[in-house]
Amino acid sequence: MTMTDKLWPGITRRWGRDVPLTVLLVDDDPLLREVLSESLAERGHRVIACGDADECLRALPPPGERVLLMTDVAMPGRSGRALADEFRRRCPDQPVVFATGLPAESVTPLRDGEALLLKPFSMRDMVATVDRMAAA
């Protein structure tokens, strides 16, 4: 599997085993993005890591591919909620996992097919949430 990241332009990293799930990972923190990407890839998911919402929307996989969006809530530019709304418009019925360091009550209420991870979270909790949402 491959992971690309603006942090290493032109470099393709390969991890994981062949499973039909792509995780679009969006976080403006490059170190956190790298750690989360590695954990998801080690679990066997194809990871496309993006630093912002616009980059994520440009990286959407082709229609019909199973994809899960995992996004930070508070980012410069378009928020995680705005990204999720556009993602769900383009990829209906695909799951979304929000991650935030904000208090849970400050996050817009979750809709069907959405989950919330509160930072700091363990890699075990993150992987379990992604797996649960992917299986739903």
Image: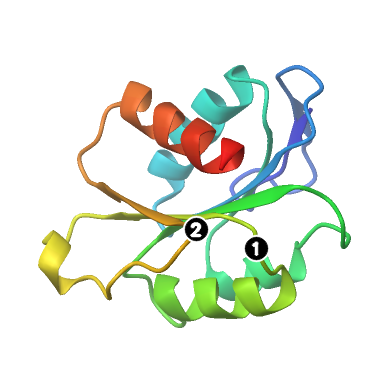
Can the viewer see residue 6? yes
Image quarter in which the C terminus is found: top right
Graded by Cα atoms within 10 Å as few (under 14), some (14 to 19) or many (20 or more), the crowding at tag 1 reads some
Q: Is residue 90 above or below residue 46?
A: below
Residue 55: image quadrant is: bottom right
Q: Quick check: marks 1 and 2 in contact, CB under 8 Å?
A: yes
Residue 93, numbered label: 1
User: Alpha carbon of mark 1 to alpha carbon of mark 2: how far?
Assistant: 7 Å
Looking at the image, residue 88 sits to the left or right of residue 82; the answer is: right
The residue sitting at 88% across, 60% down in the picture is: 62
Give the residue pinned by disc 2: 113
Q: Nearer the viewer, residue 103 or 74?
A: 103
Can you give x and y, in whole percent of width and height, for residue 89 in the image? 66, 79
Marked residue nearer the N-terminal end (1 or 2): 1
Graded by Cα atoms within 10 Å as few (under 14), some (14 to 19) or many (20 or more), the crowding at tag 2 reads some
Looking at the image, residue 121 sits to the left or right of residue 12; the answer is: left
Q: Is residue 122 above or below residue 119?
A: above
Can you give x and y, in whole percent of width and height, for residue 63 in the image? 87, 62
Q: Nearer the viewer, residue 100 or 130?
A: 130
The residue sitting at 75% across, 70% down in the picture is: 58
Can the viewer see residue 79? no
